[in-house]
Amino acid sequence: MQQFLTTALTGLTQGMIYAAFALALVLIWRSTRIVNFAQAPMAMITVYIALVIIDAGYSYWLGFAAALLSGLLLGAVVERVAIRPVEDKPHINAVILTLGLFIVIHALAAVIFGSNYRSFPAPFGLSGFRVGDVNVALTGFSVFTILAVLAVMLLLVLLFRFTNVGLMMRASAFNQEVARLLGVRVTRMLTQGWALAAMVGSLSGLLIAGGNLVHPSYMDSVVVFGFVAAVLGGLDSPIGAVVGGLILGVSLSFVSGYIGSEVIALAALVILMVVLLLRPGGLFSHAPARRV
Amino acid sequence: MRTWSRRVAVFTSVLAAGAVLAACGAGGRPDEGKDSTEDVVGVTEDTIKIGAHFPLTGVAAPGYSEIPSGHKAYYDYVNANGGVHGRKIEFVVRDDAYNPTQTSQVTNELVLKDRIFAMVGGLGTPTHSAVVDFLNGEKVPDLFVSSGSLQWGDDVESKPQTFGWQPDYETEGKIIGKWVSENMPNARVGLFLQDDDFGEDGEKGVRRYLGDQIVATERYTSGNTDVAPQVAALQAANVDIVLGFNTPSYTALTQLTANKLNFDPKWFYSNVGSDPELVGSLLARFSEGAVKDGSSLLDGVVTTEYIPGVDTPDDPWVKLWQEVWDKHGSGGKLTNYRVYGMSQAYTFVQALQSAGPNPTREGIVEAIEQAGKEFDGPALAPFRYSEDSHMGISGLRVSELSGGKANPLTPVLTTDIGDAPIVKDHSGAASDAPPEDGIPTG
């Protein structure tokens, strides 16, 4: 019973982390229609910025804010400098470019910050709660993770559904020419989309890092699982991303605990295949399939 | 689009042609070593060139990347004191990022381009496995692999050039298993194993003594940092002691996860995963101010030792390493990984001395087989080298960590793979002191 509970709860926390990353992917997909593979190293590098600030003796929250802000900036800069020149080319060009960025940022981080494991502090306790005899495998920081991801999801739903900016972002992603004709400043929307997505990415990086070890490739496995989570949810829907992340996190935790950690990647593939066979567009897709 | 793909096609065919040409070139180079008996590959009148692959970048770099700096410092020390038989040792290190594909590539470079005399200290089980056949095929001495896998020493016939160095994981597992069965005979034992040779060999040793006591066996895949499901399973099996055959980062991760699950068994980490400095520095952050000194977070953890480490600064060997590091080190302080590298380098210099004033590749292999058992050095137990076995150090002792220091719980115990008994070491290897000038005579 205790093992079941522990496995479920740690899976839940892990799922929320996948969800956070999936949210960033959804955001960029919705606002620019490309999948950004450089999301993980971009987030990683902002987490290192936070670590430098915290190491210098400032508070955790200052580092936290700095990471989010630098995420925002980095997203905008990457869009302006690297992505803009290929924006009117086929989408695949931009996607390949993000793969290239992945490698470059990785190498850069290793050069600047070194490739050693370093520990990243957490603002809340790292011991599990106890209720009577039962150990609840949630720490203060996992509760924070869950709340933060839910809040971001809610904000994104509100942004896309109820604000003008959200509508304009979707429009410019969907059809630039028409959006332009309707008076949307498309390029600005794209920059905004990238900036926001990078900020959410930084948040996911911070949530994974808290109370854990970081090194330049600490987010690499999250790229794969976060991507699977986003596709499970339909790539289009923030709620779908969170549900996808949770499904993935909890099932992988059970697979790892009761079958073996060597089959995790296989299990993720099986889940993805089953879902896509049953609902080709993902669990929460509304629109008919579009071409990438 | 059309011209683009054509351009790519032209580009790739040019590349392919270039690669083919380059490959032909490499194969067609005359092997100077074979043409003349006096000319040995990698050896000149006043130098001898050796090389190794190490992870200088990537996930395995923390800690391990310091080993070659220890090698380098000791060779520089030897060179500054006249070298070995008048020859200076050149040590070429290439980065394989702990990726077997890259290991093959850099080993090719070391052997065919740098033309090294011998490989010394190449690190890692999966990585070195990728090149061990190539090295043996090319008849390159493959000395003192930095890994405790059995395969470097238990099959001399198929790998005549390869020698292990540190105690193999099975030997270590046997000694750990016996200690637990004697000191905690009623304990429920859980295993936490890396899912490769490391965990497998260790488990083989442990099971010889703890067959009935083991109630849970959990394996983790290196790279997957979420070990909560594994630790939860150990907790569910209600184990009293966990035996971990894992790397240092996983020691930190299991401690963090156990904290999350309020799981507090006795922990026994094998030598690989227990460096108190490295693990302590990783954990210090998470102690939430309760403990200032990170390394004391590992208080009560049991582990094994086979060479003296930086926690015993008064040990004559550690004094020598400190002196070498102060004079020839590349900056930073002396760590256990650098001590490991220097200890290995010491054994190599000893082997080279034994090979005589005109070393050959066959000669050094033969010298280690003949004299290796008698090599004095920092190791607490003697080597097992002979014509039938290329296994390294034969034993270790069990210690408990306290305040970042290892306090011995047992004398040095030696054994061998298979059903060889575990006995107290009487060779006196643990009390060897380095020679006056710090350079072995062979």
Image (spheres, rainbow, N blue to C red):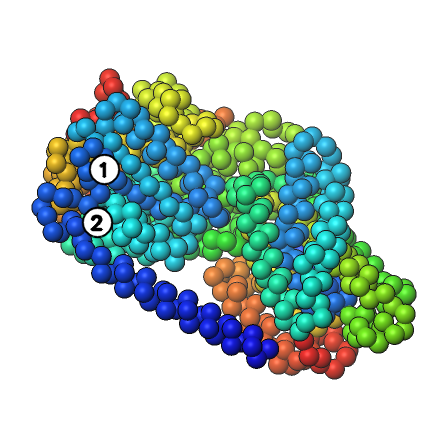
Total labels drawn: 2
Relative placement, left or right, of B367 versus B128 is left
Disc 1 and disc 2: Cα gap in Å? 14 Å
The residue indicated by pointer 1 is: B48
Q: Residue at x 77, y 79 (%)?
A: A287
Where in the figure is residue B412, as x and y percent of width and height?
28, 31
**Quadrant of the frame with the C terminus of chain B:** top left
* Image spot of residue A40 (x, y percent): 63, 55
Residue nearest the observer in this picture, B398 or B101: B101
Residue that label 2 marks = B140
Residue found 47% across the figure and 74% down from its top = B9
Could you say which is closer to the camera, residue B237 or residue B202? B202
Which element is circle 2 on?
A: loop
Earlier residue among tags 1 and 2: 1
For mark 2, name the chain. B
* Relative side of B362 to B106, left or right: left
Q: Quadrant of residue A160?
A: bottom right
Which quadrant would residue A25 be assigned to in this image? Answer: bottom right
For image coordinates 16% across by 44% down, the residue present is: B40
**Do badges 1 and 2 share one subunit?**
yes
Mark 1, secondary structure of its residue: strand
Picture layout, residue B258 above or below residue A269: above
In front: label 1 or label 2: 1
What residue is at 67 percent from the left and 59 percent from the top?
Answer: A82
Q: Which residue lies furthest to the left in this view?
A: B37
Label 1 packing within 10 angstroms: few (<14), some (14-19), many (20+)? many
Q: Where is residue A232 in the image (x, y as percent from the top left)?
A: 66, 71
Q: Circle 1 marks a residue in which chain? A: B
Whether residue A208 is visible: no
Q: Is residue B132 above or below residue A61?
A: below
Which image quarter is the N terminus of chain B in? bottom right
Cβ atoms under marks 1 and 2 closer than 8 Å: no
